[in-house]
Amino acid sequence: MNKIMNIGKKRWKYFAFFVVVIGLLAISILTMYNVNQRHYSILTDPSELLDIAKKDLMSDIIIDLRDKNDYEVAHIGKTINIPFVDGSEIDDYLIKNNSKSKTVYLFCYSGNRAAVAFNYLTEKGYKSLVYVNFGYEEFCERTNNTFIPATGPCDCLADEIKILL
């Protein structure tokens, strides 16, 4: 009877060890999945973009892809002006400012440049992108005059970043 009990205890220890190993393996796989998980979305509500801009979250970046002159005339406060050329200028900015892991909102005149930039950054491996499918004028119209535009140059863009205008 003692032999049978000892065999049972040994099997129980092996079984417990096996369960722990499988559990650790499952946790590591889930962690790797979550780290590599991508979050892409489309923003359709201008008031939501206005709320994001007002919150000034360090984890969010709103990039205004319009030309420099249009940005200086009127823009959403706390946005970063990176006039769209081919997408590499956005990638350069995000890399140089260690912002690749932040949620990036892409915003332009009508949504076309933002769509191209979105696709470019997706191919570059960015994990958290939001395509804003409306433009600046529509944003102004649909926020029902609750939005007061900022004016002037973008003081957030580093001098060393070369942007072709």
Image (cartoon, rainbow, N blue to C red):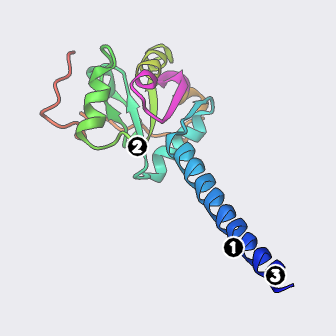
Q: Residue at x 60, y 56 (%)?
A: 27
Q: Which residues are magenta?
A: 121-138
Q: Residue at x 12, y 33 (%)?
A: 160
Q: Is residue 36 left or right of residue 13?
A: left
Q: Is 134 covered by the magenta stretch? A: yes
Q: Mark 2: which secondary structure? A: loop
| Mark 2 and mark 1: Cα distance apart in space | 43 Å
| Mark 2 and mark 3: Cα distance apart in space | 55 Å
Tell me which amino acid carries mark 3: Met
Say which residue label 2 marks.
101
Q: Mark 1: which secondary structure? A: helix
Q: Is residue 45 left or right of residue 158?
A: right
Q: Mark 3: which secondary structure? A: helix
Q: Is 63 covered by the magenta stretch? A: no
Residue 165 position in % (x across, y down): 21, 15
10 Å crowding of disc 3: few (<14), some (14-19), many (20+)? few
What is the quadrant of residue 85 in the picture?
top left
Looking at marks 2 and 3 on the same chain, the residue that comes earlier in the sequence is marked by: 3
**Compared with residue 24, is residue 99 higher up or lower down, i.e. above or below?**
above
| Mark 3 and mark 1: Cα distance apart in space | 12 Å
Tell me which amino acid carries mark 1: Lys
Residue 10 position in % (x across, y down): 71, 74
Say which residue label 1 marks.
13
**Residue 51 shows in this picture:** no
Q: Residue at x 59, y 59 (%)?
A: 24
Q: Quadrant of the N terminus?
A: bottom right
Q: Nearer the viewer, mark 3 or mark 1?
A: 3
Q: Is residue 74 left or right of residue 106?
A: left
Residue lying at the far right in this picture: please name it. Answer: 1
Say which residue label 3 marks.
5
